[in-house]
Structures are given as C-alpha cells and as structure tokens.
Amino acid sequence: MTTTLNVNIVHPGFAKSFDISNFCTTTHDKFTYQYMSASKNAESDQARFYWIWPNMMINVYPGDGNVNTIQVIPVDAETSLGIYRDYSLNEKTTIEKEDYFKFVDQVRQEDFELVEKSQKGLNSQSFTNGIFSPTEHAAVYFHELIEGPP
C-alpha cells in the first residue's frame, strides 16, 4: 500500500497507467527486478525495470520495442550525470511512440525534481538520519551491497 500511495503522489501519470497494487520487486546477484502489469486486466503486458549494480537501469515498457536505459555517473559528492537512451525495434515514429516518449519524459522530469528535493533535504540542518519504507526492497538491497557482508 505504501508503494501505491507514494507512486500516486510522485508519478500520477505512471500510477494511472500501471497496476501499482501488484508491483513486485525481487533481488538477485547485483541487480533487482521490478515489474507490474499495465492494467489489472493485462497480466501479460508488463512493465519491467532492471536496476543493475552499481549505476545502470534498463526499463522495458509494454509495446513495440519500448526500452530505455539510464546510466548514472557520479560527478562529485552531490552531483550525478544521467545518460538516457531510448531504443526501438522500428525507426518509424508513430503516434504510439510519440505518446510513449512523452510519458517517459514526464516520469524523468518528475524524478529530476524528486532527486533534487531529496538532495536539498539531505543537506538541510534538520536531517540527521533517514529510514526506508517497508516497500523499498531495491534501495535496501543496494545499501546492503555498499555495506558488504555483516
């Protein structure tokens, strides 16, 4: 339920497009796999997200070749460079592809705003320590990779 609430707030268009109530995360050796159906009635039409340690994401959306990658490269302690690439099976631009690119760009812009606000909060005098929500399995897993075995 926390995942649904958070996504509804931070990515309202995404939350309307996918069945967030069935969002699943699994952890594997150096990557996480997250997935959900495009709607409650379309189990075979899934959005799939692979977060690969330490800095690569591969996103596969329903449709004809709707794949994008995000590589995050640290520049300094407070700045990262995101390299975004979109891939398609067909070079022809269709209305569906234009809608897909608008959708992905909207989610990216929302992420930029969220990351910048989070960084500002981390640097505030009010912040001393944070906790993960019970649904942030992927983030917890990556922090465990950083910390190493107990």
Image: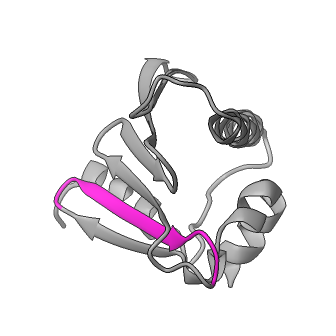
| Relative to 54, 102 lies left or right | right
Camera-nearest residue between 15 and 38: 38
Residues in magenta? 29-40
Residue farthest top in this picture = 75
Q: Quadrant of the C terminus?
A: bottom left
Percent across and percent down for residue 25 are: 41, 72
Camera-nearest residue between 119 and 135: 135
**Residue 104's quadrant in the figure?**
top right
Q: Is residue 144 visible?
A: no
Q: Is residue 118 above or below residue 85?
A: below
Instruction: Please tell me whether residue 74 belongs to the stretch shown in magenta.
Output: no
Q: Is residue 118 above or below residue 88?
A: below
At horizontal 39% and vertical 34% (from top left) the residue drawn is 89
Percent across and percent down for residue 110 are: 76, 41
| Relative to 78, 88 lies left or right | left
Q: Quadrant of the N terminus?
A: bottom right
Percent across and percent down for residue 71 are: 41, 28
Percent across and percent down for residue 28 are: 22, 65
At horizontal 28% and vertical 44% (from top left) the residue drawn is 53
Camera-nearest residue between 13 and 133: 13
Q: Is residue 111 above or below residue 131?
A: above
Q: Is residue 15 visible?
A: yes
Q: How many marks?
A: 0
Instruction: Please tell me whether residue 32 belongs to the stretch shown in magenta.
Output: yes
At horizontal 27% and vertical 55% (from top left) the residue drawn is 31
**Residue 115's quadrant in the figure?**
top right
Q: How is the image coloured?
A: one colour
At horizontal 51% and vertical 56% (from top left) the residue drawn is 62
